[in-house]
Image (cartoon, rainbow, N blue to C red):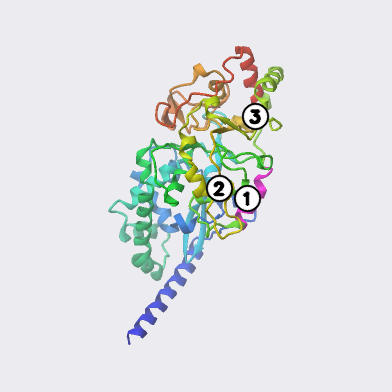
Amino acid sequence: MSGVRVTSAALLLVLGVSILSAAQQTARPDSDSFPDVVDHFKYGSIGTEEGVGIPYWIWKVLPTVFEDKLPKRPGSGYERLGFVLDTTRHERPIGTSYKDDRVARVGLNCATCHVGTVRDAADAPRRIVPGMPANQMDLQGYANFLTACASDPRFNYDTLMTAIRKEHPGIGFFTRLFYRLFIVRATKNGILERAEQNAWFERRPPFGPGRVDTFNPYKVMLEIPVDDVVGTVDLPSLWNQRMRARMWLHWDGNNDLVEERNKSAAIGAGATPDSLDLESMRRIENWILDLKPPAYPASRIDKGKAAEGRRVWEQTCASCHSTEGALVGQVTSIAQVGTDSERLNSFTPELARGMNTIGEGKPWRFKRFRKTNGYANMPLDGVWLRAPYLHNGSVPTLRALLFPDERPAVFYRSYDVYDWVNVGFVSSGAAAEAEGVRFDTTLRGNSNKGHTYGASLPALDREALLEYLKTL
């Protein structure tokens, strides 16, 4: 009789899972892939849902139930964490993916870090720019929000299901039963387990929007003792990846294989070597090979001054930053560039060896990671939309980069109104303070020192160079 009871229970569980999946498919039409490649980039799955995904209906109601846990930033719901919403394309925020494997779950994808926004003025419409660094996205804030929700006594079946039924009145009995018996508890435990893995957050200054610590999570994953070094860097752009083939990538030039860089980023976002959706990633990889940045408005460029600036560029900058430069994609030593060394120090020889074990037994196993002694010289395509500058995003505008004495000790990030005078985003003043997030260059890993190559140029040459940089 006991065997019959077990078999019946198993059948009931399978039936419940099937009904749950069917109910969610009916109630929430969605997909892990899209016919249009831009929509696929923004909303498609790369395989993170298994590792860090949240059941769709719980994820949907968290900002309502736990509105008090959200930061006081512009927008509503997940927008207050920096997710970009485009309701003309989808009701889910850009950068969130969806996969229905027994339980529909929401994860993250490439667009989480690589879609930004810009406004020409405070009262102008917001433009959404694929491939741009996600200047508004607070990845650490999102993780901390989930932890705060799961740690709250309100994270229970009754509270969550009451909110879910307001969103989806037709949710069925078996779905509710499955949530009561399994889903809510498993979700809570999963979030809190990840919070334990992220305990290293507390020993470092907060990332803030538009930044991430790329490699310290790998130390946890690879069971390498976690030190106190700060590895926080600015999110990069994804434009023109074809020309980056065989350049040294990541801010410290620790890998020269674009495909490895992409897979390591996806694993960093929550995928595992087994859950990576390689077909989906290849589709995105092929698209970003020739994805172009938006051009700086031609009407705002002084063509004569830019022509003079090109002369300065060719004499002083091109060898490191021109696509044809002899040193582009190569590493400049920390002794020479003089920028904050924390990110460089965070990637250790031991970590490089560990990274090259990821994917063991798979044809794509990592093999190109290395330890370097400095930071890589980047091509500057679309540089006007890549503010703030330096590897850690510690200099708000190109003018401040070229005039080091003008670099502010404190400014505000994530305010997306453009500063056409200084070439970057507005980073001071009442509006920036109200909508942005404070950045303090005196904190560890945030130094704005170094890269003072333009400081010795006459001021007029620097002004001309600033004008030329708008054209890249």
Q: Is mark 3 on a helix, strand or loop?
A: helix
The front one of 248 and 36 is 248
The image quadrant of residue 433 is top left
Q: Give above or below for 140 relative to 156.
A: above
User: Which is nearer the N-term, disc 3 or disc 2?
Assistant: 2
Quadrant into which the C terminus falls: top right
At label 3, counting other C-alpha atoms closer than 10 Å, the crowd grade (few under 14, some 14-19, many 20 or more) is many
Kindly check if marks 3 and 2 are in contact, taking CB atoms under 8 A apart as contact: no
**Amino acid type of the residue that numbered disc 1 sits on in the rendered structure:** Ile
Q: How far apart are marks 3 and 2 (CA)?
A: 25 Å
Q: Residue 321 carries which label?
A: 3
Position in image of residue 302 (x %, y %): 68, 19
Position in image of residue 1 (x %, y %): 33, 87
Report the span colored magenta: 279-290
Residue labelled with disc 2? 110
At label 1, counting other C-alpha atoms closer than 10 Å, the crowd grade (few under 14, some 14-19, many 20 or more) is some
Residue 288 appears in view: yes
Q: Give above or below for 90 relative to 464.
A: below
Residue labelled with disc 1? 284
Report the side of 283 relative to 333 (left or right).
right
**Amino acid type of the residue that numbered disc 3 sits on in the rendered structure:** His
The front one of 381 and 449 is 449
Q: Give above or below for 67 relative to 233.
A: below
Q: Distance between the residues labelled 1 and 3?
A: 26 Å
**Amino acid type of the residue that numbered disc 2 sits on in the rendered structure:** Cys
User: Which is nearer the N-term, disc 2 or disc 1?
Assistant: 2
At label 2, counting other C-alpha atoms closer than 10 Å, the crowd grade (few under 14, some 14-19, many 20 or more) is many
Kindly check if marks 2 and 1 are in contact, taking CB atoms under 8 A apart as contact: yes
User: Which is nearer the N-term, disc 1 or disc 3?
Assistant: 1
Residue sitting at 41 percent across and 62 percent down?
Answer: 169
Q: What element carries label 1?
A: helix
Q: Is mark 2 on a helix, strand or loop?
A: loop
